Image: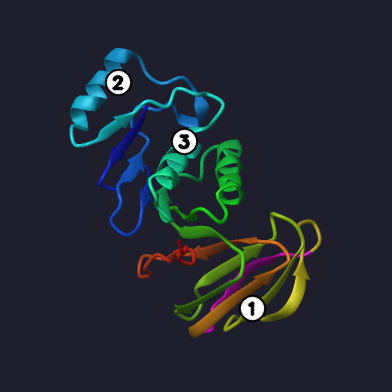
Amino acid sequence: MVSVSRRLGAGAVSRGGSAGVTGGCMGAGGRPGPSPATAEARRGALSAAEWVPAPDQEFTDLDKALCLLAGRGARNVSVAGGLGRRVDHSLSNISLLLKYRGRLSITFHTSIEDVFLLDGRWSFEARRGRRISVLPLFGQARVTLSGLQYPLEDEPLEMGKRESISNAALGGPASIVVSKAPVLVCVGRAARDAPVFAPVARA
């Protein structure tokens, strides 16, 4: 089951007022869901939620939730609790950024950073010292970085050869421009920092 709620929970929520999707009664990482009795108890606890059957175990829980959001017209999605703990789950969830590329603009939020796929340009204001990493997980990319301690000018990045790890904002305007292949952007978030989001997807 997929639970659809207007409250942000552990799972995905559409930014901009659309209904969100929480893990609800779906088994984590593609495991079978809970017993009918447990599912019924959770339904009672989440009486404001809409429950959508999603029994296909060929897809992970997050994939089902994102598919539901995309089908309902969402464009910009935040995911809480989608990274960490198991590496295989984290990598599988990151791969969904590529799967939904062009359909959803997805940002993962952990307790210490915000993570998203970038294909094009992203400009932002960052306090001095805020950590920013750029990982070419999806193939060789050409990257330009400005407003950061270690700038780049249309230089190639490729896993196993060269990445941009733990760069730091100089304070003020900064930008990342990507071509040839998308990259994974990881922006550190201290207690004083507001979260950041992937560039807004347009319909």
- The residue sitting at the right extreme is 161
> How many numbered marks have been drawn onto this rendered protein structure?
3
Front label number (1 vs 3): 3
Residue 12, x across and y down, in percent: 39, 46
Helix, strand or loop at disc 2?
helix
Residue in the picture at 56% in, 69% down: 132
Q: Residues within 10 Å of mark 1 (few under 14, many from 20)?
A: many
Residue 110, x across and y down, in percent: 44, 52
Figure check: 114 above or below 176: above
The three-letter amino acid code for the residue at tag 3 is: Lys
Residue in the picture at 47% in, 41% down: 67
Q: Which residues are magenta?
A: 162-170
Helix, strand or loop at disc 3?
helix
- In the rendered structure, which disc, 2 or 3, sits on the residue that comes first in sequence? 2
Measure the C-alpha gap from mark 2 to mark 1.
48 Å
**Label ID, residue 145:** 1
Q: Residues within 10 Å of mark 2 (few under 14, many from 20)?
A: some
Residue in the picture at 31% in, 38% down: 4
Residue 62, x across and y down, in percent: 47, 39
Residue on which disc 3 sits:
64
Residue 102, x across and y down, in percent: 56, 56
Figure check: 40 above or below 147: above
- In the rendered structure, which disc, 1 or 3, sits on the residue that comes first in sequence? 3
Q: Is residue 95 magenta?
A: no
